[in-house]
Image: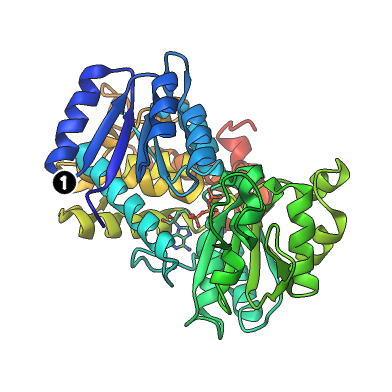
Amino acid sequence: MDMPRLLIVDDDTSFCMLLQGFLKRKGFDADTAHDYEKASQSLAKNSYDLVLTDYRLPDGTGIDVLKESKKLAPSTVVILITAYSDIRVAVEAVKLGAFEYVTKPVNSDELFHVIKEGLKKRETQEKKTKEPVQNGRKFLVGNSEESKRTEEHIRIVAPTDISVLIIGDSGTGKEYVARRIHELSKRKKAPFVAVDCGALHPDIAASELFGHVKGSFTGAVNDKTGHFEAVGEGTIFLDEIGNLSYDVQMKLLRAIQERMGRKVGGNSEFPIKARIIAATNENLKQAVDEGRFREDLYHRLNEFTLTLAPLHERDGDLMMFAAFFLEDAVAEFGKSIIGFDDEVQRIFTQYDWPGNLREMRNVIRRAVLLCKQEKINREVLPEEIYRNNSVKSQPENAQPVNDLKEIKNISEKEAILQALEKTRYNKTKTAKLLGIDRKTLYNKLHLYDIEL
Ligand SMILES: Nc1ncnc2c1ncn2[C@@H]1O[C@H](COP(=O)(O)OP(=O)(O)OP(=O)(O)O)[C@@H](O)[C@H]1O
């Protein structure tokens, strides 16, 4: 790749300058813009490989920059910089096609790493190569009942040609599941192409997917091959399928049913050989009821559905994934961290992880970069993930308890409270987790005055 060209959008001029200097030293060419208006002008005039935008801008938001960039140059990678308090916005941005988000205060190593990953994704997408972004990371099956069931279903459906619909909140691992299906299928040597339909501007969605012929609309200066044709006998993963217009949904239905496609403005048809995997994080049934999604396409896609539960509902997965992301980050950044301290484990089990696995991976990566001790401690976590939680730490002036019976009672009560939090106050699950029956649990809740 030539020297990558970046646009930094942030109203903090000194931060922009610092970042610009840092990126130049790393071999990037970086422009800056201090508000949305200037950013749109730069996007219209120049062609960027990557846009790095702050969320809060004087005349708009990073989401506006993201939308504008996706409209003008869909393959430009966009990374959002946000405060942790805006984490839900970051999750939303990813749904809208942002490649990743980075939280403040910005750590230069972390940012550089994300930029490199983003550019790698762009490069592989441009070449339509076989392996866009697995980044050498392995697929972790997970220990929860939900994860085990998902794995079982993946193995059942992978060898077939059935279209699959993956449902799950942002960051639950839908793309990872789609890749796994591809890798376990007979198509594994052919390309896997992920298309983020949420990021496709409605005006160009059909042409991106099916291609167009020269002159079919203003701007169609050459013939274009769409993803369906380019992927050949591989797998096409359509993320955020609910975002496609009715018109494109119709074309997709034909692609699935008749296995034929037609370029925008073209007369002839081409055969569609790809396997289709779609994903959504919205309730498509509701979209059908509201007339936003075609019922026939819904039923077609719904033939085989995989539902991925939110991370906080997957008992048994949380600390397993945390350990996995830790190991990954430790290897990547060459640190010698051996685990999480008890408080962090507690925080992790109490937090609800709205951004699911993606958020957890990012929190851990940053913690690894910042941590100077053997174990990850609370100080290197974003405050937001424990501030509103009732994480109970021992007060500093607490009297030591020496009475053995008292110690047993305290730890038993603590264990029950922790189990309750872990199961989100589900008593059946809590009893199971503690290895006691429900009646014993009720007796103990009464004994320790735990009100639910
Ligand atoms: N099974 C898995 N094993 C290892 N890592 C995983 C797994 N699933 C997800 N991850 C991690 O979580 C991140 C988010 O996963 P993925 O992109 O598949 O989620 P998604 O549901 O497609 O998100 P979105 O809807 O926002 O696009 C991945 O980059 C990866 O680091």
Which residue is most to the top? Answer: 58
Type of amino acid under label 1: Gly
State left or right for residue 213 relative to residue 126. right
Q: Quadrant of the image for the N terminus?
A: bottom left
Crowd class of label 1 (few under 14; some 14 to 19; many from 20; radius 10 Å): few
Residue at which label 1 appears: 27
Please indicate, yes or no, whether residue 155 appears anywhere in the rendered image.
yes
Residue at disc 1, secondary structure? loop
Residue 331 to residue 190: above or below:
above
Residue sitting farthest toward the left: 25
Say whether mark 1 is within 8 Å of ligand 1. Answer: no
Residue 296 position in % (x across, y down):
86, 60
Q: For the point 34% across and 32% down, which residue is it?
A: 382
Q: Is residue 93 left or right of residue 343?
A: right
> Is residue 106 visible to us here?
no
Q: Is residue 24 above or below residue 113?
A: above
State the residue at coordinates (61%, 75%).
Answer: 152
Tally the numbered discs.
Answer: 1
Q: Position of residue 287 (x, y in %)?
A: 80, 44
Q: Residue at x 78, y 51 (%)?
A: 247
- The residue lying toward the viewer, choosing from 380 and 162, is 162
x%, y% of residue 332? 22, 57
Q: Is residue 79 left or right of residue 284?
A: left
**Who is closer to the viewer here, 165 or 415?**
165
Which corner quadrant holds the C terminus?
A: top right
Residue 424's place in the image compared with 168, above or below, is above
Figure coloring: rainbow
**Residue sitting nearer the eye, 91 or 35:** 35
The quadrant in which residue 203 appears is top right
Q: Position of residue 95 (x, y in %)?
A: 56, 43
Q: Nearer the viewer, residue 41 or 66?
A: 41
